[in-house]
Image: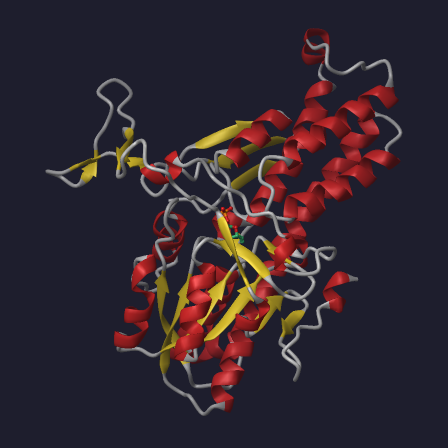
């Protein structure tokens, strides 16, 4: 098992290498794909071999660095016509074209847009290709380090906020939480966003149960309440919940029960452990707090409202769109209908319930299963937009934002 979505070998800054985990093969197969060009970055993002708003921005940015390093190699420079290496302004223009191409890979998640906006500034200040390579290397190292640091901060911010609110309502029992899609290490540079809050809640619960000494070190809150179970939603049609979040929870030994997207209300109603919160990620949070996230998030928010369960969006500031006023302005990506009609995965031998292996390569066989008539019309939006009225808090590395008495978020601090 590996939760290392992005392997960035930066031992030699002039000859760095990037390999990304092919998440379409999880949970049965762990296979990495080398990234050498912006085309490689575009492809793994478009196909969702790499997905998750922060990870998309990181892999996209790394693919730009890899292309800039590749251009400078003698073998490549002799075999290509696209860049006129004798003309720095011409190279800069060509690179700007390539950034636009990369940006078109997935339109809804804003992290890649924000990162490419920063890289345009780096490009404008670079004196030549070598200088650009150095500046880009420093930029992507900082992007990854900041993402990981901020995820742990966000996780603890969110856990403390929930535990404090439970203490205020004098709730001191074990509780469960819900989450949708994958927002963990596989969607970021590590720890995760919404799943990061769940990791912090589990750390807190463990420290209260297992080791009093550890508790003192990891003490997040005086609350006696403990998160003892997670209900991840499978997250049709690409199943990031069952393939990836369940995989991460199993890896971390966090007690969890995978549920279908259609069983949320019944699960809350019948759960022996009270469900006290839902934590979801974000692909784009706009100025009034309306949030684009994986399809099914809006529905989850409505059910939480019905049951009086707190609904939190967890995202770093790199997911903020400080231009778009409200959710009506968000472009929602429509995915290929066959990602819905056909379910992809590792072929399992019904007799042994183990992966079937290719007779020659001995690799697990990948296959697709048809679950709808090939000619049926399909609506396959990758995201929906949850109105800020259904969101109880936006958890960031800078703290937890809640609505004022008029029911509005004041996110200006995030937009600075
Ligand atoms: C921290 S991941 C944020 C966000 O991205 C995911 O979408 P996708 O799997 O299509 O890239 C999902 O909406 C997560 O909540």
Residue 57 showing in the rendered view: yes
Q: In which quadrant is the N terminus drawn?
A: top left
Q: Quadrant of the C terminus?
A: bottom right
Residue 141 seen anywhere in this rendered image of the structure = no
Image height of 51 relative to 257, above or below: above
Q: Looking at the image, which residue sits at the far top?
A: 78
Q: Identify whether 67 is placed above or below 228.
A: above
281 up-or-down from 223: above or below: above
Q: Quadrant of residue 269?
A: bottom left
Please, which colouring scheme is shown?
A: secondary structure
State which quadrant residue 375 falls in: top left
In depth, the one of 373 and 222 nearer the eye is 373
Number of callouts: 0
Q: Residue at x 42, y 88 (%)?
A: 171
Q: Vertically, is 307 above or below 232?
A: below
Coordinates of residue 87 in the picture (x, y in percent): 87, 16
Along the line of sight, the residue nearer the viewer: 98 or 187: 98
- Residue drawn at the location 72% of the way across and 12% of the way down: 74
Q: Residue at x 70, y 63 (%)?
A: 287
Residue at 46%, 60% in the rendered image: 297
Could you tell me residue 17's position as x and y percent?
Answer: 60, 30
Question: Percent position (x, y) of residue 84?
Answer: 80, 14
Q: Nearer the viewer, residue 5 or 314?
A: 314
Provide residue 383's location: percent of width, then percent of height: 50, 51
């Amino acid at each position: 098992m590996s939760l290392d979505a992005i392997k960035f070998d930066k031992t030699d800054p002039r000859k760095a290498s990037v390999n990304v985990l092919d998440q379409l093969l999880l949970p049965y197969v762990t296979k990495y794909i080398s990234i050498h060009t912006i085309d490689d970055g575009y492809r793994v993002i478009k196909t969702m071999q790499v997905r998750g708003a922060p990870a998309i921005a990181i892999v996209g940015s790394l693919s730009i660095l890899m292309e800039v390093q590749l251009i400078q190699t003698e073998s490549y420079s002799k075999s290509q016509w696209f860049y006129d290496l004798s003309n720095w302004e011409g190279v800069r223009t060509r690179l700007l074209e390539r950034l636009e191409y990369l940006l078109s890979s997935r339109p809804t998640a804003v992290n890649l847009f924000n990162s490419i906006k920063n890289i345009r500034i780096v490009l404008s200040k670079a004196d030549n290709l070598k200088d650009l390579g150095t500046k880009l290397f420093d930029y992507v190292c900082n992007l990854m380090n900041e993402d990981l640091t901020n995820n742990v901060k966000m996780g603890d911010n969110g856990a403390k906020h929930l535990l404090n609110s439970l203490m205020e309502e004098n709730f001191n029992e074990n509780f469960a939480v819900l989450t949708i899609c994958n927002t963990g290490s596989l969607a970021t540079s590590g720890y995760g966003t919404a799943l990061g809050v769940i990791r912090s809640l589990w750390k807190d619960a463990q420290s209260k149960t297992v080791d009093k000494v550890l508790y003192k070190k990891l003490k997040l809150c005086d609350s006696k309440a403990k998160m003892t179970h997670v209900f991840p939603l499978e997250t049709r049609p690409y199943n990031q919940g069952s393939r990836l979040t369940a995989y991460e929870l199993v890896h971390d030994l966090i007690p969890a029960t995978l549920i279908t997207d259609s069983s949320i209300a019944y699960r809350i109603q019948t759960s022996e452990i009270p469900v006290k919160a839902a934590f979801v990620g974000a692909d784009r949070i706009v100025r009034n707090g309306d949030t684009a996230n994986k399809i099914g998030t809006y529905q989850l928010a409505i059910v939480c409202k019905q049951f009086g369960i707190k609904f939190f969006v967890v995202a770093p500031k790199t997911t903020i769109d400080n231009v778009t006023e409200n959710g009506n302005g968000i472009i929602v990506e429509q995915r290929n209908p066959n990602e819905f009609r056909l379910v992809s995965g590792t072929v399992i031998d019904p007799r042994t319930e183990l992966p079937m292996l290719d007779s020659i390569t001995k690799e697990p066989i990948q296959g697709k299963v048809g679950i709808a008539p090939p000619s049926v019309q399909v609506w396959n939006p990758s995201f929906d937009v949850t109105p800020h009225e259904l969101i109880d808090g936006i958890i960031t590395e800078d703290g937890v934002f809640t609505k004022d008495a008029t029911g509005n978020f004041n996110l200006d601090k995030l937009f600075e």
